[in-house]
Structures are given as structure tokens and as C-alpha cells.
Image: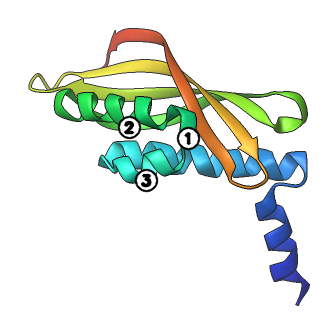
Amino acid sequence: MLAPLIQSYKQIGVSESDRQQLLQDSVKDFQRALYWGQAGEAVALTEEASQEELRKLIRTSRKSEKIVESKVDYVEFGDESMDAEVEVVVKYYKVPFYVVNERTERQKWNFSYSSGWKYVSREIVDNGSTTS
């Protein structure tokens, strides 16, 4: 009887540890949406002020690159885990060359109790290694 209540409480993100776990899920869902080219799902996980910029990025990259794999490399939480910087290693290839490249993106995420974790922006911090 209490299990659903406790689970609902955790999904709100009241405690720092709950917010930290929720971020992992949000980043995974965001990266999965980018992998499959599901712009609507990725935009739904984005802060309203950043949505148009992400739409443009997706439109541009959809035609020129394909993500092969992505994984979270490092997470740094801000005060009380209300914001975070996430380093994601992305393997991708540029169409039509099909040579897999790797880049590291530093993504910024913010948390609100009303909407959970939302993607804010990204910065490419390492772009250039080719993998076999």
C-alpha cells in the first residue's frame, strides 16, 4: 500500500538523491530520442527557452550525422542537486562517409519541481577522435 506512495514521492524529486537518480533517467531518455531522431521527445525534455535552438540543431544534424552510441561519462551536480553538468561521450558518423567519430559534450540541465529535469544547452568540449 505504501510502495506506490513512496515511488510517487521519489518521482517528484524532493530529496537530493531522488533528483540525482531522476537526472540519470532524463539524460538517458534525451540521448535515446536523439539517437532515434525523435525531435519531439528530445524537445519535450528541454527547457522552453532552449527548445528552438535544439530544434535547429536537430534539423541540421539529422541530415548530416547519425549517432551510433552515447554514454554518460561524468555528472557534476550543483547546490542541492537543482542543476547539473553532464559530460556525454557521443559516437557518430557523418553522412555519407560512415567513419565513426567521437566527441564529448558538456550538457547543462536544470531541475524544477513542476517539470523535473530539463536540458538547457550543450558545449562540445572534445571533437575529433576517430574510432575503428
Of helix, strand and loop, which one carries label 3? helix
Real-space Cα separation, disc 2 to disc 1, in angstroms: 26 Å
Query: Which residue is disc 2 drawn over?
Result: 69
Nearest the eye: 116 or 71 = 116
Please identify the quadrant where the C terminus is shown.
top left
Disc 1, SS: helix
3 or 2: tag closer to the N-terminus: 3
Task: Give 76 or 102, whichever is nearer the viewer.
Answer: 76
Q: Is residue 132 visible?
A: no
Disc 3 or disc 2, which is closer to the eye? 3
Q: What residue lies at 81% left-to-right and 81% top-to-bottom?
A: 4
Residue occupying image coordinates x 18% and y 27%: 64
Q: Residue at 46% of width from left, 42% of height from top? A: 31
Residue 27 sits in quarter: top right
Quadrant in the picture for the N terminus: bottom right
- Mark 3 Cα within 10 Å, few/some/many (few <14, many 20+)? some
Under mark 3, the amino acid is Glu
The reply to whether residue 10 is in sight is yes
Q: Are marks 1 and 3 in contact (CB under 8 Å)?
A: no
Q: Identity of the amino acid at label 2?
A: Glu
Please name the residue that numbered disc 1 is placed on: 48
* Separation of marks 1 and 3 at Cα, in angstroms: 13 Å
User: Which corner quadrant of the image does residue 9 belong to?
Assistant: bottom right
Tell me which residue sits at (35%, 44%) in the image: 35
